[in-house]
Image (spheres, grey):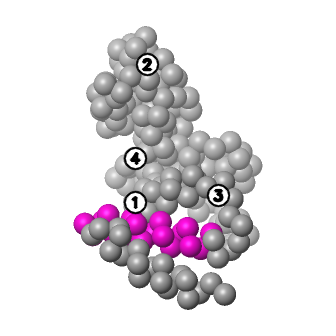
Amino acid sequence: RLQGRGISDRYVRLIVSDGAGGICAAIETSYPTVARQRCVVHKLRNVFDNTADTSHRKELLAAASWIYDAQTQTEANQRLEQVISQWSEVEPKAIASLWDDFPASIAYLEPLGISQPERFCTTNAIEGGVMRPIRRRLDCATAYRTEVGANCALFLTIGRLNSQRNGELWMQNCHDILYMLRNEIP
């Protein structure tokens, strides 16, 4: 779609994505000359998810994050080697997820002509603060019989999240939401 809008690789220096195979293949096909950076937040989340022993999860994440504070790719690779030597026996699965596609996760350190390079990421406040809790709650149900049922589940989930954020009791707010939804249902 970006190419259809006239965005050619002549105008793009860096594309940031998660590690999904489809998006990586699309980037390599559509923008073969553009540097692709693996989203650092998604990369660190994979390390978190693959940590077997939760008692040292925080320490491992700090070590993995430290890698991305490097100023050059050489420094980042040296830091990676240190983290691998310290953690590979203790957390092999987490370290494997850190190693997987690692060069792409430090692409922002390449000389791309980008002023003030930083750890670009695809995750934003909407995804992490709003969409993740909604997905987590809605994933419990496998199917909805009607569109109204799906809408009810969505509205109730958002109402519950709002109550939690505002420090209010869910039961006080659900009455109004349920009353409104009951009047919507034929």
| Circle 1 residues within 10 Å: few <14, some 14–19, many ≥20 | few
Question: Horizontally, is 102 left or right of 57 in the view?
Answer: right
What residue is shown at x 39% (from left), y 65% (from top)?
161
Point out which mark residue 9 bears. Answer: 3
User: Do tag 4 and tag 1 residues touch (Cβ < 8 Å)?
Assistant: no
Between label 4 and label 2, give the one nearer the viewer.
2
Rendering quarter of residue 60: top left
The residue under label 2 is which amino acid type?
Glu
Q: Earlier in the sequence, mark 1 or mark 3?
A: 3
Q: Earlier in the sequence, mark 3 or mark 4?
A: 3
What residue is shown at x 74% (from left), y 49% (from top)?
29
Question: Element at badge 4?
Answer: loop
User: Do tag 4 and tag 2 residues touch (Cβ < 8 Å)?
Assistant: no
Count the labels in the image: 4
Alpha carbon distance from label 2 to label 3:
39 Å
Residue 100 against residue 81 in the figure, above or below:
below
Q: Is residue 24 magenta?
A: no
Residue on which the image places disc 4: 119
- Residues 149 and 64: in front is 149
Bounds of the magenta span?
Answer: 150-167
Q: Main secondary structure of the magenta part?
A: helix
Residue 17 against residue 171 in the figure, above or below:
above
Rendering quarter of residue 124: bottom left
Question: Element at badge 1?
Answer: helix
Residue 148 against residue 26 in the figure, above or below:
below
The residue under label 1 is which amino acid type?
Gly
Q: Earlier in the sequence, mark 4 or mark 1?
A: 4
Residue on which the image places disc 2: 91
Residue on which the image places disc 1: 129
